[in-house]
Image (cartoon, grey):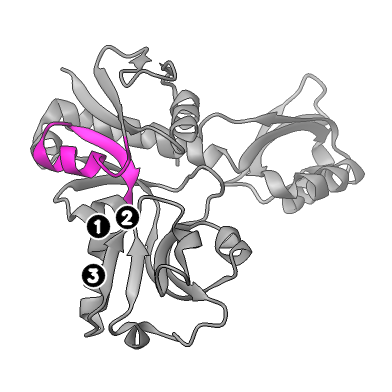
C-alpha cells in the first residue's frame, strides 16, 4: 500500500515537517525539490502549493494532503476531512480572511462595497460573500502585496492574516471577517473508504494531534514524603491523576504527572515548599488522549 500525500511547499513547509518529525516521520527535501523523502515506505509525498492540494485530492490525484481550510473552501473541493490540526507558521491562532479598507475610508460594511473594486487572492470566497449580501462589485485576483494596492488601485482588499499587524502597518482597518481557517488533513473520499489507507490516515492523524497536544505540555516528576501526597496533589492540575510509586524508603514516594508548560514557573516553587525534592521537568513528543 502506498499513500500519496501532498504537503504544503512554502511558508508552511518548515512547520509541517517539524510537526511530522515530532509525530515520528522524518521528511527531508532540498530547496529545489518537490519530491521529499521520508522514512516510511508506505508514504509517497509530494510538495505543492497549499492552494493546489485540495484540487488534486478532490480529483484523486492525491490520496491525502495537508492544507488550509480556506483553500478547500475557495476551490469548493469535495473531500473528507480527517483532522483539524491547529498550527501555522507564526501562531496557533486561526488564519483569518478579512475585509480591510484604508483607515479613513467611508466603507463601513459589505453594503458599502456596491460598485467598488476589491483585490484578493480569494476571488471565489469574496464573490460568494458579496452575493450573500446582495452586493455587486469588481473583484480582481491579486498576485501578492495586496496591502499596497489601497487606496490608489482598489477601494478594499480581502486578505489573509494571523495577527493583523501587517494590515495595521499599512494603515488599514478590518471591517469584517469572511472566514477563519486552520490547517486540515484531508483525504480523497474513495481513498478514505479503502481500509488500509483509512487506517494509515487515522494513525497519522492520531500522532500528529498527539504531537500538537504535547507542544503546550511538559512532564514533571519528583520525590516527596508520603505524608505530603495530598498537599502536593492539590497543587498539580494533572491531566487525570498523578502517578504515585513507592520508593525503597517507605516514608517516601515518587510522583509523576503532565502539566501545562505555561504554569510550570508557578508550580515548581510551590511544590518545593510543599516538601517535594528532586523535581525534574522534561519535554514531551506526543500526548495521546
Q: Quadrant of the C terminus?
A: top left
Q: Is residue 51 above or below residue 145?
A: above
Instruction: List the residue tagged with mark 2.
Output: 70
In the image, taking residue 284 as reference, residue 146 lies left or right, namely: left
Residue 12 falls inside the magenta stretch:
no
Which residues make up the magenta segment? 49-70
Whether residue 288 is visible, yes or no, is no
Whether residue 267 is visible, yes or no, is yes
Instruction: List the residue tagged with mark 1.
Output: 73
In this rendering, the label closer to the viewer, 1 or 3: 3
Assign a secondary structure to mark 2.
Answer: helix
Q: Earlier in the sequence, mark 1 or mark 3?
A: 1
Instruction: List the residue tagged with mark 3.
Output: 127
Name the residue: 36% across, 15% down.
38
Q: Position of residue 24 (x, y in %)?
A: 44, 22
Crowding near the residue tagged with mark 3, few <14, some 14–19, many ≥20 C-alpha atoms within 10 Å: some
Residue 57 falls inside the magenta stretch:
yes
Q: Are marks 1 and 2 in contact (CB under 8 Å)?
A: yes
Name the residue: 18% across, 18% down.
2
How many numbered badges does the structure rendering display? Answer: 3
CA distance for labels 1 and 2? 5 Å
Amino acid at each position: 500500500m502506498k499513500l500519496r500525500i501532498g504537503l504544503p511547499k512554502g511558508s508552511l513547509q518548515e512547520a509541517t515537517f517539524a510537526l511530522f518529525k515530532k509525530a515520528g516521520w522524518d521528511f527531508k527535501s532540498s530547496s529545489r525539490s518537490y519530491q521529499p523523502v521520508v522514512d516510511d515506505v508506505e508514504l509517497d509525498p509530494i510538495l505543492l502549493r497549499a492552494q493546489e492540494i485540495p484540487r488534486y485530492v478532490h480529483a484523486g490525484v492525491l490520496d491525502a494532503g495537508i492544507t488550509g481550510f480556506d483553500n478547500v473552501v475557495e476551490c469548493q473541493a469535495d473531500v473528507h476531512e480527517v483532522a483539524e490540526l491547529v498550527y501555522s507558521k507564526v501562531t496557533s491562532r486561526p488564519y483569518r480572511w478579512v475585509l480591510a479598507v484604508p483607515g479613513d475610508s467611508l466603507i463601513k460594511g459589505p453594503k458599502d462595497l456596491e460598485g467598488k473594486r476589491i483585490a484578493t487572492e480569494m476571488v471565489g470566497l469574496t464573490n460568494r460573500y458579496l452575493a450573500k449580501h446582495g452586493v455587486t462589485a469588481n473583484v480582481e485576483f491579486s498576485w501578492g502585496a495586496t496591502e499596497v494596492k489601497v487606496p490608489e488601485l482598489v477601494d478594499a482588499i480581502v486578505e489573509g492574516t494571523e495577527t493583523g499587524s501587517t494590515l495595521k502597518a499599512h494603515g488599514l482597518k478590518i471591517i469584517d471577517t469572511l472566514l477563519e481557517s486552520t490547517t486540515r488533513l484531508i483525504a480523497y473520499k474513495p481513498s478514505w473508504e479503502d481500509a488500509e489507507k483509512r487506517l494509515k490516515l487515522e494513525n497519522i492523524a492520531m500522532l500528529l494531534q498527539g504531537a500538537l497536544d504535547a507542544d503546550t505540555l511538559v512532564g514533571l516528576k519528583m520525590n516527596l514524603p508520603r505524608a505530603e501526597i495530598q498537599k502536593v496533589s492539590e497543587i498539580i492540575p494533572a491531566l487525570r491523576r498523578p502517578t504515585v510509586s513507592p520508593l525503597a524508603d517507605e516514608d517516601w514516594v515518587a510522583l509523576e504527572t503532565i502539566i501545562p508548560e505555561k504554569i510550570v514557573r508557578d508550580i515548581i516553587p510551590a511544590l518545593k515548599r510543599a516538601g517535594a525534592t528532586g523535581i525534574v521537568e522534561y519535554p514531551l513528543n506526543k500526548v495521546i488522549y
